[in-house]
Image: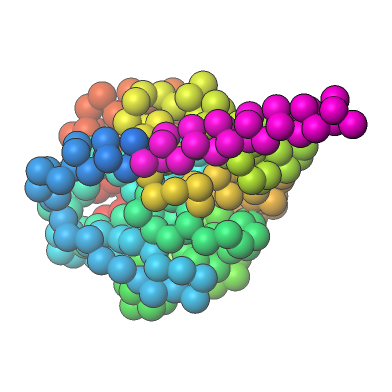
Amino acid sequence: MKKRYKALLIFTGITAVIAATNHLLFKLCDWLHNLKHNNQAFLYSGKTYNWRFGDVKYTVSGSGKPLLLVHDIKVGNSSREWEKYVKQLSKNYTVYTIDLLGFGSSDKPRITYSSYLYVSLINDFISECIGESANIIASGSAAGFVAAAYAFKPGLYNKIMMLSPNGPVYISRLFGKLIDLPVYGTFIYSIFSIKNSVCLDSFIKSHKGGIGNKYPISALFSKLLHVDFDRFISGINIPVYVINKGRHVSLLKDMRAFYRVCRGFFS
């Protein structure tokens, strides 16, 4: 009996320490994010789309034909992926960037995240916020969501550019389930974020706004974000420009060159 009581006390103590660590880590990341960004002037104004599953943050800048930029699905990512692109592109286009639900400054509800959720969000955003057919640039695994979104509502799309398109990278469904657990799952998510964040800023973003950041990542590893990319892209009947990872990396070093590619394709 005493051994069981002692084991329970140890387990309770460890759980309390981990819970406190989680709380402090998320609070620290919120503070660091605010410290970094409070004094920065945005190139564009932030707006809110009151979607049926939560508030979605987006930005609009420039003038001309609408161009929607959809960020990749990975730890700590958001529409800030496009910061280097917007300044050039907004010279000739009305540029929209969106924080997908569960990322960036958008709401992070505890719901079932799926590929269809993001497909629906992209189509609803174009219909309700842009209000007309648009050109699209999608990065990484988001290219699959856009290809699937086109299959449901092709009239919303003019031309699509895909940067380093790939399917979501899976580890295991078990790992996804572990991340979804309270307290211990959140701690595992933090460790994973440390190992997979490309920089401190990426890690901070992966914790900004609370534990809701982990839910789409859990869905990613649980294979709920899978899209049959080859099947959907083969059914697209509008111009599609695919830029592979090697060329994408080189274009990032010369934004003027990337801008020229966009002008040539979207004109």
Res. 149 visible in picture: no
Q: Is residue 86 above or below residue 243?
A: below
Q: Position of residue 243 (x, y in %)?
A: 44, 36
Q: Quadrant of the C terminus?
A: bottom left
Magenta segment includes 142? no
Residue found at x 56% / y 32%: 18
The answer to whether 118 is drawn above or below residue 85 in the figure is below
Q: Is residue 132 left or right of residue 171?
A: left
Residue 224 image position (x, y, % from top left)? 69, 51
* Magenta stretch, residue numbers: 1-27
- Identify the residue at horizontal 67%, vertical 35% (top origin): 12
Quadrant position of residue 246 = top left
Question: In the picture provided, is 93 more to the left or to the right than 181?
Answer: left
Write the residue at 61% across / 41% down: 183
Q: How many marks?
A: 0
Residue 224 sits above or below residue 166 on the image:
below
Magenta includes 22? Answer: yes
The image's colouring method is rainbow
Q: Quadrant of residue 204?
A: top left
Q: Is residue 257 above or below residue 158?
A: above
Q: In which quadrant is the N terminus drawn?
A: top right
The location of residue 4, given as percent across then percent down, is 85, 30
Question: In the drawing, does residue 83 fall left or right of residue 110?
Answer: left
Q: Compare residues 127 and 211 and report the one nearer the observer.
A: 211
Residue 79 visible at all:
yes
The residue located at (40%, 31%) in the rendering is 203
